[in-house]
Each structure stands twice: as structure tokens, then as C-alpha cells.
Amino acid sequence: MQATGFDRLEALHAASDFVTIAAPHTLETAGLFNARTFAKMKLSSYLINVRRDTIEMLDDLIEALQAGRLGGAALDVLAVEPLPREHPL
């Protein structure tokens, strides 16, 4: 069976120290970075989002960070800006 594009992405996520989101926000990429994606990444890896349209699931990202399943994240853009003071980020 031939690997799909998403299978190849998962393999890249599992091997990468830094994962950068620079993809456009489309029906195919909406929610692409979610709990499943973060679980495939190395515990020491960092997620970097440089896109104006966010395609990571922020609640899943916060949970992964708080649980120590990611080394960290750098987010240039958030769905709500500025974040409320009580926001976990």
C-alpha cells in the first residue's frame, strides 16, 4: 500500500525537532495540527506557526504543552488577539 500525503507528514512530524506551519488554511488543512498530530511528534520537538490563518487546534496544543508532550511552541498568530490575561498561554 502506498503512503498518503498525510502518512508522510506523520513520519516527518515524528522525526522532526521543529515543525513549522506555513500551509494555507483550506478545507484539507483545517485542524490538521491536533491531538493526534502532537502525539506523533517527539517530546522535545517544537511547533512553530507563522501563518495568519491558524490551522492548529489551540486547545489540543495547550494540552500537549501542559502534559509535556512537546518541547514548546512559537505562535506568531492566534485566533484571539490579544489573549485574555487568564489564558494558559
Image (cartoon, rainbow, N blue to C red):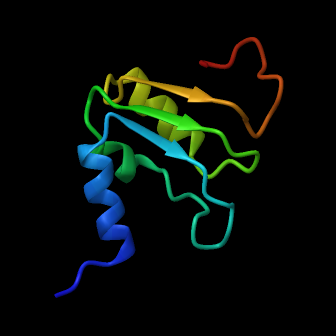
Q: Nearer the viewer, residue 71 or 79?
A: 71
Q: Residue at x 76, y 45 (%)?
A: 52
User: Number of numbered discs present?
Assistant: 0
Q: Nearer the viewer, residue 49 or 69?
A: 49
Q: Nearer the viewer, residue 87 or 21?
A: 21
Q: Residue at x 68, y 47 (%)?
A: 54
Q: Is residue 77 left or right of residue 41?
A: right
Instruction: Determine which quarter of the picture holds residue 24.
Output: bottom right
Q: Residue furthest bottom?
A: 1
Relative to 78, does residue 9 appear above or below in the rendering? below
Quadrant in which the N terminus appears: bottom left
Across and down, in percent, residue 53 comes to 74, 50
Instruction: Determine which quarter of the picture holds residue 44.
Output: top left
Q: Residue furthest left?
A: 1
Q: Residue at x 24, y 45 (%)?
A: 15
Relative to 72, does residue 45 appear above or below in the rendering? below
Across and down, in percent, residue 51 comes to 69, 45
Q: Nearer the viewer, residue 36 or 41?
A: 41
Across and down, in percent, residue 38 comes to 37, 43
Relative to 67, does residue 34 appear above or below in the rendering? below
Relative to 39, does residue 1 appear above or below in the rendering? below
Quadrant in which the C terminus appears: top right
Instruction: Determine which quarter of the picture holds residue 9.
Output: bottom left
Q: Residue furthest top?
A: 85
Q: Residue at x 47, y 35 (%)?
A: 47
